[in-house]
Image: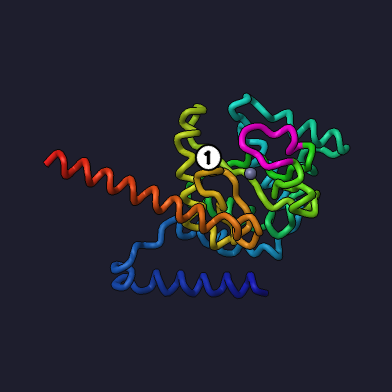
Amino acid sequence: MFVLHRLGASLILGIVLFSFPARAALHPAPTSSFLDGLVWQLCIPQMLPDAVVENYLFAIYEATPKIDKTGDFTWKDAYAAQLVGMDRKTFVIGGVEAKFKRALYCMFRAMEANGIKAGITSAFRNNFRQFIAGGQRNAPGETYHGGDKVTLGYGYGIAVDIVSLHGSTRAEQLASNPVVWKWIDRNGELFGVGRPYLDRDAPHVTPRTSPEYAAHYLASLRKAILAAMTKTKKKNGRHTKRQ
Ligand SMILES: [Zn+2]
């Protein structure tokens, strides 16, 4: 019913926009991305079947190269899943908390509609998987990806790592990461998700209601603002000297 209601409202909005050329001239014309946008505006998390959400997120996960400073870490999820007798999809995506999974589905659909290609390098991680994680990481039980000290474990992972899939080389992909992260900073609120550490652990995304987000986001934002102000001051300083 709600879908029909929303659809009806959108159609009426469309008719209103298209029937008043004078008014439309004052505003940006509806574009195909505007119409694509409607697809995700109709994304009602409560109504999404598990299988649709999980297949979609797993396809994104599969399409994402998993490379860090230690090299290709694709084997880690496969190995951790095998140890608990699960296939990779059941482990990596099935272990993510249900509402968060649906919010991510809607957000990725929205990014797609906006021409943003993003991928998932890591989703659910149990204690063992966290133990073999590389780079900066919390102690095995203490990761919101699914550690058993801060979440209820499997089925309650509330963190995923998101990167860009733009570009055909590794270097291009890395260089385009900020496009994806900035998009999430600007629009994540619509889906209730955000980056608690901003650039200190840039790919890491959680629900905005998570303890991790509450504990770290404002401090990260403050640091980012101070850094930006210092940068501007330096730039202005240089400018003054040149004159
Ligand atoms: Zn993470």
In this view, which residue lies farthest toward the right? 85
**Residue bearing the label numbered 1:** 164
Residue type pointed to by label 1? Ser
In the image, 215: left or right of 186?
right
In the image, 146: left or right of 112?
right
Q: Residue 231's quadrant in the figure?
A: top left
Vertical order, 25 against 128 (above or below): below
Does mark 1's beta carbon lie closer than 8 Å to ligand 1? no
Q: Residue 112: x, y in percent?
A: 53, 49
83 vs 32, nearest the viewer: 83
Vertical order, 30 against 235 (above or below): below
Please identify the dominant SS of the magenta region: loop
Residue under the point 50% across and 27% down? 169
Residue under the point 57% across and 55% down? 216
Pick the quarter of the image with the C terminus: top left
Residue under the point 86% across and 34% down? 83
Q: How many marks?
A: 1
How many other residues sit within 10 Å of disc 1, few (<14), some (14-19) or many (≥20)?
A: many
Tell me which image quadrant ligand 1 sits in. Answer: top right
Magenta region:
129-139
Pick the quarter of the image with the N terminus: bottom right
Residue 153 is covered by the magenta coloring: no
Q: Residue 182: x, y in percent?
A: 46, 49
Q: Residue 39: x, y in percent?
A: 56, 59
